[in-house]
Image (cartoon, helix red, strand yellow):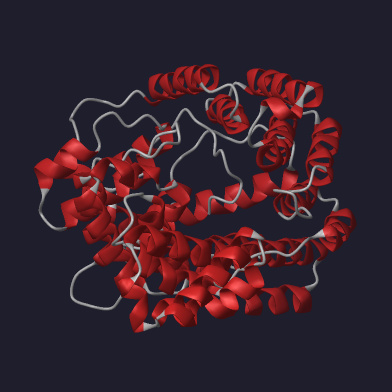
Amino acid sequence: MEAYLSSLRALAATAEASQCAEVVKDGPRLVADARFDKVNLEGRVWILSSVVLCAVNERNERVAFDGVGMLAPISTEDWPRHLRIVLAVELNETEEAISALRTWSQANPAAVSQMKTRSVWELLRKAGELKGERDRRLEVHDILSQANYRSQEPFGIDAIRIEHARLLLQNGRVSEARRRVEGIVKVVTHVEMAADRTFDPIRSDEKIDFAALAATEIESAVAVAKAHPRLLEARYREVQAYRQAGRFNDAVAAADAALAAVAADASQFDDSQEYVSWLHNDRAYSLYELGRNDEGRAAMRAGIAAGEGGHPNVSQVINLAELLVDEGRLEEALAALKELGHASAYGSMWAEAVRACAAAQNGDAATLEEALAKLRENEKDNVAALQRSLLCGNQIEEAAALYIKRLADPSLRDGALLALQNWQEDPANLPFRKEVYRRLDVLRARPDVEAAIAAVGRVLDLPLIRAYWGSF
């Protein structure tokens, strides 16, 4: 036993010296030894914490996952329980992630709100992929709701709440669904509920004033930005709220003020690396919507120059290329894509859509079909990119069939219904975008598409613009 304890002391010294590679190499063997249980509780917690944190530092998810599985039951802290869920999701151990969430919620429900919303969404996505008779997303939602999950981020969880409400309604739990949607702020979430017949059992007969809801969202966004001065994301969401309501001058002014604050002292924000590029992004859109295309192009290029989360830019490169395509500046659009950093599968689909739409305008049928073939093959990665590309190529029959398929599939329906609403005309001077939306209007009026919409939802006349060009 003494030799074993000596090895543990050596491991502890290695950890204190921040020699994590050695800790990850030797730690798993030592903590798996039956004699480890004879070490006092404080010592076990310290050793396991060191192994786990070093494994995270070394990006060895499996060692971290195994270690935190031993640590969570004996630690009085919440971070091991949280980390266990995150790692389980990363390693596709979804059943374990759900079990760990349930255990944590029972032990300390208030602490569950430490989870970032992006972690919650990733768990929900993985839960939805599990095979079985019941939708496991509902189980995750129920655990979160019972723990009164609120997230420590100040922007609300409207999207999480509406998905939970939809699942509750699909399972006949109407009163719970009604409570779940109380107090929702985001106007686009109200549009989703009003457009989808799933929500009819909890829908009021009163006419919905979407303009008033948009004004309320602006007020909320301004208040959140004032209450959280260190969050640049709050300033970005304020800009978004102005744009959605069509207040483009206010959006530009809010973006200018936020960017000036960053230029004066970026350290006053905790998340400037993540959101500077997005402020430039929505400033660019607002300038386009004001007819100031040259300034809009320059603003999007400033977003590209800012990088993205400390990495080469992807999102603004794609968004600039799309704007250039819609302006008819096709060579510039394709050249812009050469600046693209490492894109996700989702982003790569949008880049392919830019190529498809450029080819359609150029009359290059071979390149268009080549791009469409790639988009069809990878439809599950980004169905909206395929949908837009079919409209760009004036492939109306296939585009209509794809919308009908999406409307019939509950997992794809919300995006299709949003795209098919009667939004305010986009004021930007983008000729090809206007043509694509004209084709969408024609498609929406087809009897087969009208019938598919009517079966599951409805089309609303909205006093709002599409806040995202990729809503197809």
**Relative horizontal placement of residue 372, taking residue 471 as reference (left or right):** right
Instruction: Name the one closer to the observer, 208 or 313.
Output: 313
**Relative horizontal placement of residue 451, taking residue 3 as reference (left or right):** left
Q: Position of residue 85 (x, y in %)?
A: 38, 61
The residue at the far front in this view is 2
Q: Quadrant of residue 393?
A: bottom right
**Which residue is at a point 52% across and 62% down the rendered structure image?**
50
**Relative horizontal placement of residue 25, taking residue 156 as reference (left or right):** right
Quarter of the figure that contains the N terminus: bottom left
Instruction: Name the one closer to the observer, 54 or 363.
Output: 54
**Eyeballing the image, is 121 above or below 63?**
above
**Which residue is at a point 24% across and 31% down the rendered structure image?**
182
Q: Is residue 238 visible?
A: yes
**Which residue is at a point 66% across and 60% down the rendered structure image?**
17
Q: Is residue 390 visible?
A: no
**Which residue is at a point 58% across and 53% down the rendered structure image?**
439
Instruction: Name the one closer to the observer, 169 or 227.
Output: 227
**Eyeballing the image, is 77 above or below 389?**
above
Tally the numbered discs: 0
Q: Position of residue 269 (x, y in %)?
A: 66, 29
Q: Position of residue 168 (x, y in %)?
A: 18, 52
Q: Position of residue 107 (x, y in %)?
A: 22, 51
